[in-house]
Amino acid sequence: MGKRVYMLVAGLLILLLAAGCAYETKEQARARLSGGGGNAAAGEAGKLTNIHFYVPSEAENKITIVDVPSGKPVGSIDVSEAPTNVVFSSTMREAYVANQKSSTVSIINTQTLQVTKEVPVGPMPHGLALSPDNRTLYVSTVADQYIYVVDVREGKEAGTIDLGTGAKTNYLVLFADRLYISDHENHKVYVVNTKTKELVHTIATGNTPRALKVSSDGKKLFVPAAGSGTLEIYSTEDFKPLAKIEIAPGATDVVITEDGKTAVVTSMESSSVSFVDLASNKVTKTVTGLAGARHLAFNRMESRVYVTLSGSDELAVIDAATKSLEGSIKVGATPHGVTLKALPGIGGSC
């Protein structure tokens, strides 16, 4: 009898996990939203254990919060002018937002959904990277040659990293003690040692490099080059090129599956998303008709790809297995980045 009960409970748990990221029915959503918990004022949007995407809206100066299981907006946060990208602390209790037109970074309490601090940085902040200990935020600014270093505990700028006269900083990614920064005007990627705060290498890339990613093992750097319409791959050991893959004009952002087998690349000017087999370095499928496809993110199980469409004010949902458009979610005007808020080990298959 005990064994049968155990098997029944285990089966029910498996079914619940399998259904965890399916779109909910109206009845399921109603039941979930009436379940209480979390911050009373912020509701479900401020519940720490919920799985959300934060989507900055450049034209409306706000963050749209999208609930992953239901695929619906559940809240918003007002920030400063032209927010572009978001990063979270490892506890998911704080979010940091780059506000391009106000030249600030907003620090947000993700449970109260309130801006707790506005930190002035350089002109037109765009890219963000947070150190693993949650103490140091690196900010790239489109209009000058510096990386701004923010002490998040003090809530103020704590210095800069100078990349040299004429340099421009666009996107950046942090891995271990290395910071990689794209320069979209000079067609380069800068490599900075965060311990010494010194430039240690410069990689010449294709035209207009944009959002960068590093493989999960830290051995490869992925560079979408918009002007060349390529995805370029470099060794992080000697910085030599490993591959150049034809994508589409306007290659913008890239995500890599945890197993390192597949890359997914947006092309903003081509309004498309391309799936790339990294064993053959070939495009296996391109999804078109995605107006101004800009940034993208996986859900936790990498079963779906979510893409900001700056041309239609939507978050597109693509099935990663079939590589086809599943639907879209209306968000704020001119969405820019998209970042997943999810505590480790919570959220089932979301």
Image: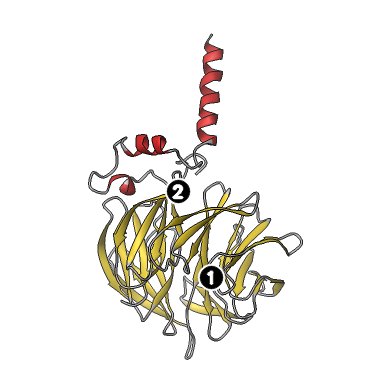
- Image quadrant assignment for residue 261: bottom right
SS category of the residue bearing label 1: loop
| Quarter of the rendering containing residue 330 | bottom left
Which one is in front, 44 or 235? 44
Residue contact between numbered discs 2 and 1, judged by CB atoms under 8 Å = no
User: Can you tell which mark lies on residue 211?
Assistant: 1
| Camera-side residue of 215 and 211 | 211
Looking at the image, tell me whether mark 2 or mark 1 is earlier in sequence order.
2
Query: Which residue is the extreme one toward the top?
Result: 1
The residue indicated by pointer 2 is 71
Q: Nearer the viewer, residue 294 or 87?
A: 294
Residue depth check, mark 2 versus mark 1: number of the one nearer the observer? 2
Which residue type does callout 2 highlight?
Answer: Gly
At x 43% / y 64%, what residue is drawn? 313
Where in the figure is residue 256, as x and y percent of width and height? 61, 59
Q: Residue furthest right?
A: 280
Does 82 sit above or below residue 330? Answer: below
- How far is mark 2 from mark 1, CA to CA? 25 Å
Residue at the location (27% across, 69% down)?
118
Residue 129, image x and y in percent? 44, 66
Model colouring: secondary structure
Q: Residue at x 56, y 75 (%)?
A: 269
Vertical position of residue 278 compared to residue 59: above or below: above
Task: Determine the secondary structure under disc 2.
Answer: loop
Left or right of 16, for residue 57:
left
Q: Is residue 333 visible?
A: yes
Residue in the image at 36% along x and 34% along y: 31
Look at label 1 and name its amino acid.
Ala
